[in-house]
Amino acid sequence: MENLRKISRLPAIILFSLLTACNGARQEGVPTVGFVDAFEDNTIAQARIGFFDALKEGGFSEEEKTLNVIYRNAQGDIPTLTQAVRYMITQEVDLIATNPSLSTIAALQNTKDIPIFMMVSPLPARMEVEDAQGNAPDNLFGVAEDLDYIDTSFSLIPRLVQPEGEKLRVGLLYNQSEPQSVDAYGRLQGLADALGVELVARPVNTTADVQLVAGALLNENIDAFFANPDNIVFGSFETILKAANEAKVPVFTSEAGLVARGAVAAYGADLYQWGYQAGQQAARYLKTNSTEGLSWEMVKVRKRVYNPAAAERFGVAVPEGYEAVE
């Protein structure tokens, strides 16, 4: 199962106490939503914003006193993440919203009854939460994504980057403790072979290792870097980007949010819309107090985006149909 390095230096129980001190009084007679972020990240946060915007449009908001919200951010600490989920269970929340997959897994491990609305999460099979018959948990809802979209993003690199040698070399970091990351690596290896690209991949297990491993990888004469969509890359992207820029290696990705943070281009899910889609599902549940007709679903909104400053830095001519983001 996924492992994430403890980012906080505070003991988990002290950190949890600080996190639980921020809730206001609950309004009587209105539903209560628990929202769990596994770690702090500007890209991931867009999904949370989208989720609550959809709830508000559905008639549920703290401002209008039609919704209670219990929010927790585990700051990358797994025991704190588990405690956050268990606290919400004791508070008898109507649903738990989870962002990203680490939160989804933690919630599923601790409750089979409370509906869970996931976002920024892979397919249930990739999170290893299905039963022996291949069925997802009965209380799992929200929005997931598969790896098909990665092909389009990765395939863009040979079109835009001219290698110095005879064969294009693309660097990749992957988290060997995260099933989705390992699966993406395997898929990209097959795609690279088909495209005649040499994939230079290195495993990394913690955010503390990223600077060293990324630096070593960038010294292997790679022509481009592909930011694999996993939790470590999200949490360490600025470290990767700084090293790549200094080595004059363009970074591509499959996450639109990482383009806003400095990658050249991507085709992938819009994280705000991802959260919004999950929020629409949650609003429907809160209105009916029933999960009948609901099931987890695939991401509906994907975008082709590019970063003008990054494209100019590396002299990349982005194809038509890509939307500029700042």
Image (tube, rainbow, N blue to C red):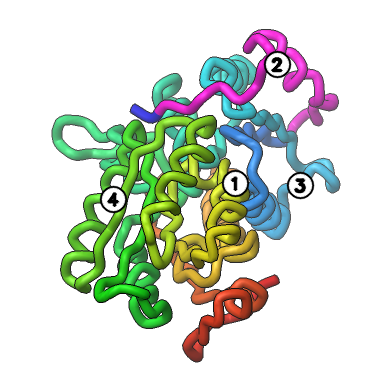
State which tag comes first along the sequence, 4 or 1. Answer: 4
Q: Is residue 229 visible?
A: yes
Q: What residue sits right under mark 3 in the picture?
A: 61
Would you call the spot at circle 3 few (<14 residues within 10 Å), some (14-19), or many (20 or more)? some
Between the C-alphas of marks 4 and 1, the distance is 20 Å
Q: What residue sits right under mark 2 in the picture?
A: 15
Q: Mark 2 is on which residue type?
A: Leu
Query: Residue at horizontal 49%, vertical 37%?
Result: 212
Q: Quick check: is 40 in the magenta stretch?
A: no
User: Is residue 53 left or right of 120 when viewed as pictured?
Assistant: right
Whether residue 220 is situated above or below residue 90 in the rendered picture: below
Q: Mark 4 is on which residue type?
A: Tyr
Of 121 and 142, nearer the camera is: 121
State which tag comes first along the sequence, 1 or 3. Answer: 3
Q: Nearer the viewer, mark 2 or mark 4?
A: 4
Q: Residue furthest bottom?
A: 320
Q: Nearer the viewer, mark 4 or mark 1?
A: 1
The kind of secondary structure element at disc 2 is helix
Q: What residue sits right under mark 4 in the picture?
A: 185
Q: Which residues are magenta?
A: 3-29
The kind of secondary structure element at disc 4 is helix
Splitting the image into 4 quarters, where does residue 194 fall?
Answer: bottom left
Q: Nearer the viewer, mark 2 or mark 1?
A: 1
Q: What residue sits right under mark 1 in the picture?
A: 239
